[in-house]
Image: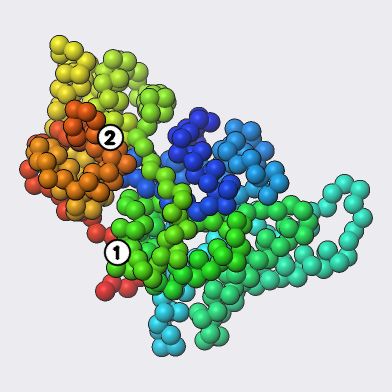
Amino acid sequence: MAKARYYHPDYRQAEVSAIVEALDQGNSVSVIGPPSIGKTNLLRFLDQERLSVTDPNSPWMRYAPNSLEQGPVVAINIDPNALLPALPSERGRIAAEAWPGFELLTHRTTITPQLYPVLHRRRNDQPDDTLLDQVERLQARFESAHLEVTDFEDYLHAHLALRHLENIINATLTSHRVQQTPIRLAYFMDEFERLLGAMPDYFFVALRSIRDRFKYSVMFVTFTRNSLDYLSGERLAVLEPFIELFNDSTVYLRPFGDDDAWRMIEQLEQRSVSKDDYALGLLIRETGGFAGLLRAGFKHTERLAEIAARDYRQAITQGATLLSAEPNIQAECATLLRGLNREEIATLYAVVNTRRDLNPVLVRELVNKSLLAQDNAGIRVIPPVLAAYIANTPTPPEGRAVTPPVTLPEV
């Protein structure tokens, strides 16, 4: 059995604290980051099934002080790859298309063990028949929600899916509130681009209505490669009620800082052999701390140790050029670029080719994504290995189109 990865308590401290603190304040959060940045491990680090509820090192304890009075934040992971196929649309196209989203949220809520309504008996407490009856009614409502959402004999089940989701959320929040053990819910939506492309506008406007009904008790976290405004495109006017939930809390995933980068290298060395520290330091600088590039470059550390340069900066430049010729590094750079939109890719190529007619909005977005650095010396592409790859790859790759979940019919 594979050993579970160890995460230092301070792993990605800036981003983790920003996400959890925003949720603790009752705000929804938009998390934006390019490919190769290490999003998957961030999600694993925040996974509450990995953590003890009372672990003082848990980010859900360290960065959520309001949990003491308002209750813990329970994270519910929503994976668009788990969407069921849309229903036949004879009795309502919008309801049929939105049903997979409501079904997924209802299902994931029902299987999250912390959310099941139970009677919390305290020592020496006398049985309270009224409270017991109330909790039992809430249990029945909780248990029936997913069955009713998937009751295909009732032709209105797709139309009522939103109501069943509301009922199950209300049941779990009420059962905890009446026993003075409140909780809060946060739906983590990974690959939100795919959910946005798969669900009709009605679905997201309905999520806003849920947020308004259970204000400060239900939040959403989206993980995307671009801003929600950009992804919404021509749908922005309709989706604005949902999108504006995230206006105050946008977190850009940055590459690893030195501490996290060295910790990752230590874990890579556990599966291999120890490498030369000087070469490893060059690797961190050349890859900029991008997790995917760091992992891909680790196997070439011995070649970096052979670099003879006048100074450290020149050694970084030479090492970046050397790495950019390696097939696995080229594949990682291409993956990173394809995760951007067409305009962002063109801007990176324009910077490498020393063009000056740059869109300031795109420049700012790429700076936020840690793909451009801007200072008194001008603008340059980072990390250095990506700049070297672009310089030696004249034809830019096409930005990757958002692929719908495989359960949805092809257009």
Report the amino acid beneath label 2: Leu
Give the image location of residue 333, x and y in percent. Answer: 21, 40
Asked which colour scheme the image uses, the reply is: rainbow
Report the amino acid beneath label 1: Gly
2 or 1: mark nearer the eye:
1
Residue on which the image places disc 1: 233
Q: Is mark 1 on a helix, strand or loop?
A: helix
Give the image location of residue 274, x and y in percent. Answer: 35, 18
Relative side of 51 to 279, left or right: right
Identify which residue, 270 or 118, lies in the foreground: 118
Residue on which the image places disc 2: 293
Q: What element carries label 2?
A: helix
Who comes first in sequence, dot 2 or dot 1? 1
Identify which residue, 266 or 314, lies in the foreground: 314
Residue at 58% in and 48% down: 25
Residue at 30% in and 20% down: 280
